[in-house]
Image (spheres, rainbow, N blue to C red):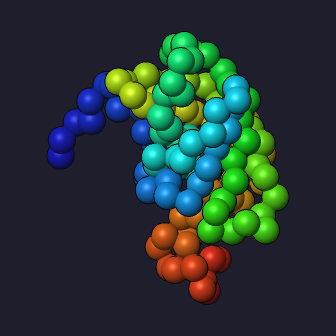
Amino acid sequence: MSKPTKNDRRFDDRHVGTGLVTRFEGHEFEVLDISIGGMKVPVPAGTRVWKGLEVDFEMDSTNWPDMRTAKGKAEIRAVVGDWMALQFVRPSYDLMKMVSRHVATLIWGSDKPYGY
């Protein structure tokens, strides 16, 4: 059995973020990947970010446009080149519903957003 590296922060499976759009500090962009614990997004052009910074954000699903906009707070856990990893801080019900429905859609298809 291989020992995980001490730099690996991930506890949850990551999934492609295609179809999720997030906004903060006047910037809007597609989510690169997402898990129940956080997301990876591009670093907004012209914005200074650093590890430990907390940001407020909003997220919408282009796959499920009728879903309520999810609002949340996240802490930047890593900044690598042109992307950054964010960990959700006390995620809201709407945010967890959006993430879980997104993942279910990827796994089971858009006709079964709840897995059945």
The answer to whether one can see residue 115 in this image is: no
Q: How many marks?
A: 0
Could you tell whether 84 is left or right of 64 in the image? left
Q: Position of residue 77 (x, y in %)?
A: 50, 24
**On screen, 24 above or below 111?**
above
- Residue at image position (37%, 24%) is 80
Could you tell whether 96 is left or right of 49 in the image? right
Quadrant location of residue 74?
Answer: top right
Quadrant location of residue 115?
Answer: bottom right
The answer to whether one can see residue 111 in this image is: yes
- Residue at image position (54%, 47%) is 30
Q: Position of residue 73 (x, y in %)?
A: 71, 32
- Residue at image position (27%, 35%) is 4
Q: List the single residue furthest toward the front.
A: 46
- Quadrant holding the C terminus: bottom right
- Residue at image position (56%, 70%) is 104
**On screen, 24 above or below 91?**
above
Residue nearest the viewer, comparing 39 with 60: 60
**On screen, 40 above or below 15?**
above
Q: Position of residue 82 (x, y in %)?
A: 39, 28
Q: Position of residue 97 (x, y in %)?
A: 71, 60
**On screen, 105 above or below 112?**
above
Residue nearest the viewer, comparing 63 with 11: 63
Q: List the single residue furthest toward the left.
A: 1
Q: List the single residue furthest toward the right.
A: 68
